[in-house]
Image (cartoon, helix red, strand yellow):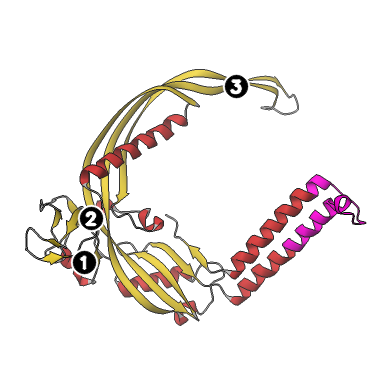
Amino acid sequence: MARCAFCDADFETGPGDVLLICPYCGTAQTKEGVKFKDHYMIRVHFDQHEAQTTLLDWVSKQLGVPEDLPVAANFVKYQQIWYPFWISRVDAQTEYRGLGRDANFYNEWPQRRGAYKRIEFFMKPESGAFTRRHEINIAAVKDIDEDVRNQPIPTRAKEYFSHAHAEEYDGKVLHSNLSEEQAKQMARQIALDRQTKLVLQEVSKIESRDDKIDVGETFLIHVPVWELEYRYGNKKYKASVSAPTGYVIESEYPRSMAFRAGGIGAGLIMLLIGVGLILLALSDVIGLPLPTLFPVGGLISGGLLAVIGLVLMYKGASSKEAKERV
């Protein structure tokens, strides 16, 4: 339990919470009662019914979905969760020296321009610099779904946090498990890693580097997500939909019996063909009176077909989970 330093109300907290949001007055504050001012939100633009409609419309377009899903699905649970994220804008400059891979080309084929009989690779010194501004999103709660963690956040639409707005939708506002200083340290490391990837696109080996990492504006933003659950037939399926944009973060959905049967049937055929090729390739080893054709190739092809067949059978028998592409 904690007591708000601004409205004197008692409210529940978790063991890892370090930046608290009072559920009564909406004030962001540290455990010591110090107010945090840079606290924003993304406003809800899709209410519960609009989120459900958007989800069913999107799911109905996925491969193998039953045609009657939009009318037969029955939503049994819904909740709006306000997830906290730290956003840092980081200016990074990296000067580097290293070894890059290059090549010399010899004896061009006369029949084909641009093709050479011999290519000789070698390493040569290279240097350069990268200057980038990174906007880094860091989920401020530990137990968060990976897809919710990586959802696109339209930070240009941010506005100061209003607890009254969250209450309009009975939203559950989560506390932050990270302090501002912890978030800045993580943002610095992420920016450094991104700079390293840029350098390694130019050189194979970094011999020296000089990094200047400036973590600038850092703020806490709460992003509302509809956590939905619907029933189709005898099964339940879960989904997460962005309340500001209607973006389908992730969703489980059923597949029609015809699609499943087709997947299982095709998988079984490929599995049988693969097993047959493996038996032909191993006929001498296991003593079968069968002609041995391309033993190595038969093993590879048969094994590949058998694996694909098993995957198709598994996919046909299981429900599907998909994500909307950015």
Q: Are marks 2 and 1 in contact (CB under 8 Å)?
A: no
Residue with the mark numbered 1:
166
Residue 297 belongs to magenta span: yes
In terms of secondary structure, where does tag 2 sit? loop
What amino acid does circle 2 point to?
Answer: Asp
Q: Quadrant of the N terminus?
A: bottom left
Q: In x, y percent, where is residue 206?
A: 44, 24
Circles 1, 3 touching at the beta carbon (< 8 Å) = no
Q: Residue at x 42, y 70 (%)?
A: 238
Q: Are marks 2 and 3 in contact (CB under 8 Å)?
A: no
Q: Is residue 146 left or right of residue 223?
A: right
Which of label 1 and label 3 is nearer to you?
1
The magenta stretch spans which residues?
Answer: 270-298
Q: Which residue is mark 3?
A: 103
Q: Which mark is residue 17?
A: 2
Q: CA distance from mark 2 to mark 1?
A: 20 Å
Q: Is residue 46 visible?
A: no
Which quadrant holds residue 56? bottom left
Earlier in the chain: of badge 2 and badge 1, it is 2
